[in-house]
Amino acid sequence: MMLIGIDPHKSTHTATAVDPETNRDLASIRIDVTLQEYQRMLDWASQWSERRWAVENARGLGHHLTSWLLARGEEVVDVAPSATARVRQLSRGAGRKNDRIDAAAAACVAALQGDARPVQPDNSTDALALLDERRSNLAQARVRAVNHPRRRECCSTRRS
């Protein structure tokens, strides 16, 4: 089974395929965080019929991608960022760090150390909590926009 480690960021994700037998980095892809790019990454990964995704911080920055992969029947495990940092320091030295190395470290943690936790799809309670958080964020953004002092200046009309 091929392990594909994911190093997620706000605007991009890097995926690195690691052979669990040899712990060797075989291939890597970097994508933007869009549904079209998620599909491109899944198409890239389809060259390995048996695969497991090891997502660093799957409940944080990797949450959307993790949910998308689970909805497509993919097997996903969550890897703690502290575990990938430990692997990176031990295997490559403390000075080297980039997204491809971080993604490979996530796969190595899943393969070697057993520190990864299987991720299950969100239930309806999780989905409702996410929607409630989004509603609150939108309401706060609206209040900030209405209360912004420059907005009042530009919207007021003066007659001379």
Image (cartoon, rainbow, N blue to C red):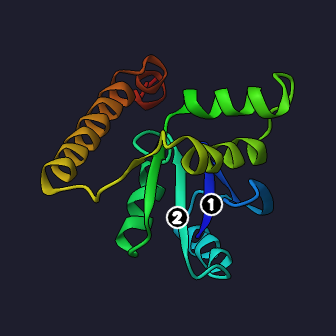
- Asked if residue 97 shows in the view, the reply is yes
**CA gap, disc 1 to disc 2?**
6 Å
User: Pointer 1 and pointer 2: residues touching (CB < 8 Å)?
Assistant: yes
Label 2: few (<14), some (14–19) or many (≥20) C-alpha neighbours in 10 Å: many
Q: Quadrant of the N terminus?
A: bottom right
Q: In this view, does 157 lie to the left or right of 41?
A: left
Report which quarter residue 51 is drawn in. Answer: bottom right
Identify the element where label 2 is drawn. strand
Element class at badge 1? strand
- Location of residue 122 in the rendering, given as x and y in whole percent from the top left corner: 25, 55
Given residues 155 and 31, the one toward you in this image is 31
Horizontally, residue 14 falls left or right of residue 71, namely right
Q: Position of residue 10 (x, y in %)?
A: 58, 43
Q: Which residue lies furthest to the front in this view?
A: 21
Q: Mark 1 points at which residue?
A: 4
Residue 52's disc number: 2
Give the percent coordinates (x, y) of residue 148: 41, 21
At 31% from the left and 35% from the top, the residue drawn is: 137
Above or below residue 63? Residue 57 is: above
Residue occupying the point 52% across, 64% down: 52
Q: Residue at x 43, y 17 (%)?
A: 149
Q: Which residue is drawn at 63% across and 70% down?
A: 41
Mark found first going from the N terminus, 1 or 2: 1
Q: Where is residue 29 in the image (x, y as percent from the top left)?
A: 74, 63
Residue in front for this viewpoint, 58 or 108: 108
Can residue 8 be seen from the camera position used here?
no
Q: Of the residues shown, which amino acid type is indicated by label 1?
A: Ile
Give the residue type that dot 2 points to.
Arg
Q: In which quadrant of the rendered view does residue 32 lie?
A: bottom right
Quarter of the image where one finds residue 124: bottom left
Viewer-closest of 49 and 96:
49
